[in-house]
Amino acid sequence: MDLREDLKQLEQEARALIEQVKNSADLEAARIKYLGRKDGVLTGLMKQMATLSAEEKPKFGASVNQIKNALTELLDRKAAEFDAAAAAHAPREDLTMPGRVPWRGAKHPVTLVIDEICDIFRTLGFSRVRGPEAETEWYNFTALNTPLDHPAADMHDTFYLAPGVLLRSHTSPMQIRTMQQFQPPVRVVVPGMVYRRDPFDASHAPGFEQLEGLAVDEGITFIDFKATLAEFARRLFGPRTKVRFRPSFFPFTEPSAEVDISCTICGGSGCSTCKGTGWVEIMGSGMVDPSVFTHVNYDDERYTGYAFGMGPARIALMLYGISDIRTLYDSDVRFLEQFA
Ligand code: 2NL
């Protein structure tokens, strides 16, 4: 048999087959068929070399090698063609796509309200102070004219950390600390977290921000008290806001009053927010009880003052028209980002 003729025919067959291959999987199959190390056609031919004479061997070997190189070149060219076609159809970068908007931090609505309230009181001469959340019974109750067996202590009597030490139930302890540290005149606002044994529902939370204020000096009267708090309410809720003082009771003030404003939703005609009354309560307040002054060694004959306390979260509900206080504590950025 003429091995050289066989080789030529083999090469032509192989070329024809590889040329009409349509995809890279079939191309790989063709590569294995001809160039596969174990069972490839060319490997088979090399094995036949053993049967040849000494002078035929090198020529035959050279021919097989030449075919191998030619087929390798052809296979590589086809592979490159398939790769280029695949790349042409692959998805490319869309340069018209808008960029990702970076996340922006923002102040929490309750923080915004606290800052606004403190700002108003700053223009009225009040400093902003803060203090510890863990307090002693003396600062939280006793100094505030609230004996531990007083009914007011009962509802506050909660979240004890150790005997005689508790999470403060109001920020008043910090006003006591301020009076111990400074002589009158004293004018401070005290925002901060307070803790009470309250349920978590639409209008309560067991931990919440409170904001209290205190003014003490010689000659402060009920007129200063009413005028200052009414002015504050009109600055926060708008100049047409009506303000009323309703008699109330706190152990640390005498007399005491709840401060109501005309309803921000209906303007006073009556709606669900004000439960048909036209008024909504914004804070508790009163003239500081003289017994509080004795506890901080102020002369209770010389000094008078007023104090007040409010819940900025509840005020945030009114100002922003939010119906459930829990949305302020859920930390859901989809809700909070609207305040950015
Ligand atoms: C409320 C009522 C109030 C005070 C807080 C106070 C503090 C001192 C002396 C006297 Cl050191 N009073 N604070 C007075 C009246 C009311 O808060 O409803 N808070 C949410």
Image (cartoon, rainbow, N blue to C red):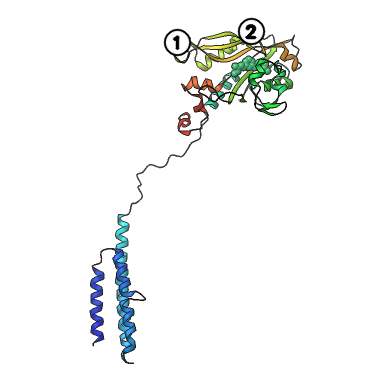
Left/right placement of residue 330 relative to residue 196 reads left
Whether residue 2 sits left or right of residue 120 in the image: it is left
Q: Amino acid at mark 2?
A: Phe
Label placed on residue 270:
1
The image quadrant that residue 164 belongs to is top right
Task: Give the quarter the ligand 1 occupies.
Answer: top right
Position of 331 relative to 213 (above/below): below
Percent coordinates x, y for residue 284 in the rendering: 60, 14
**Quick one: label 1, few (<14), some, or many (20+) residues within 10 Å?**
some
Question: Image quadrant for the N terminus?
Answer: bottom left
Mark 1 or mark 2, which has the lower sequence index?
2
| Mark 2, residue position | 222
Q: Position of residue 190 (x, y in %)?
A: 63, 22
Q: Nearer the viewer, residue 252 or 224?
A: 252
| Residue in front for this viewpoint, 155 or 52 | 155
Count of labels in the image: 2
Residue 192 % position (x, y): 61, 25
Task: Give the residue type that dot 1 points to.
Answer: Gly
Q: Secondary structure at mark 2?
A: helix
What is the quadrant of residue 191 in the picture?
A: top right
Q: Residues within 10 Å of mark 2 (few under 14, many from 20)?
A: some
